[in-house]
Image: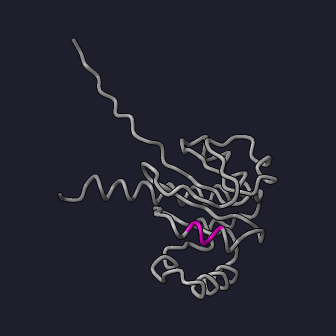
Amino acid sequence: MDIFIEPVLPHPQLVLCGSSPVAVAIADLARRIGFDVTVCAPAAEQASFTQADRRIEGYALPVEVAGMRFVVVSTQGRGDEAALQAALAVEADYVAFVGSRKKAEVLKAKLAERGVAPERLAKLKAPAGLDLGAITPDEIAVSILAEIVAVRRSKHSREAYSPA
């Protein structure tokens, strides 16, 4: 008799705040590569997403999540502060903002004034994604997902090979 054991691990969680074309492209591509996708956006904007594992009206991110969690804020000026504040309030392996470095610095300063802890603000990756010279929403989504995969795999490598 042969016994095969196959571990069933939770899928990594990708939380998208906003419904920009970049967020929609990320949701589509992320599902194809095995992420569970949660979409956080106002109800009127939810129709932009054809598929999502979970939908949340507004930016009330789930606090407890099994496995790794990655959060991308892609609001394009519609709820930037609220979405960023929510994203920085939860535990995540990666938090990124789709926007310019200058815009991110302005938002970080506003959030600091609101009392967001400096160590939380330091975790924010802005602009999101690897610098591939991406221009279109799909290209930007690829650059962001490539960065997320790199973070995910490097964390797994460190955990798998670090001495106990």
Image-based side of 129 in relation to 122, left or right? right
- In the rendered image, residue 74, in percent from the top left (x then y), is placed at 69, 64
Residue drawn at (38%, 58%), measured in percent from left and top?
155
Total marks shown come to 0
Q: Compared with residue 65, is residue 106 higher up or lower down, i.e. above or below?
A: below
Judged from this view, the residue extending furthest toward the top is 1
Residue drawn at (66%, 81%), measured in percent from left and top?
107
Describe the colour scheme in one phrase: one colour
In-front residue for pair 30/108? 108
Residue drawn at (62%, 71%), measured in percent from left and top?
84
In-front residue for pair 33/83? 83
Q: Compared with residue 45, is residue 82 higher up or lower down, i.e. above or below?
A: below
Q: Is the magenta stretch mostly helix, strand or loop?
A: helix
Image-based side of 50 in relation to 31, left or right? right
- In the rendered image, residue 16, in percent from the top left (x then y), is placed at 64, 56
Q: Compared with residue 98, is residue 36 higher up or lower down, i.e. above or below?
A: above
Q: Compared with residue 58, is residue 112 higher up or lower down, i.e. above or below?
A: below
In-front residue for pair 132/121? 121
Image-based side of 50 in relation to 39, left or right? right
| Image quarter in which the C terminus is found | bottom left
- In the rendered image, residue 78, in percent from the top left (x then y), is placed at 77, 68
| Image quarter in which the N terminus is found | top left
The magenta stretch spans residue 74: no
Residue drawn at (46%, 62%), measured in percent from left and top?
93
- In the rendered image, residue 60, in percent from the top left (x then y), is placed at 61, 60
Please identify the quarter of the rendering in which residue 111 is found. Answer: bottom right
Q: Give the range drawn in magenta.
A: 83-87
Please identify the quarter of the rendering in which residue 36 is found. Answer: top right
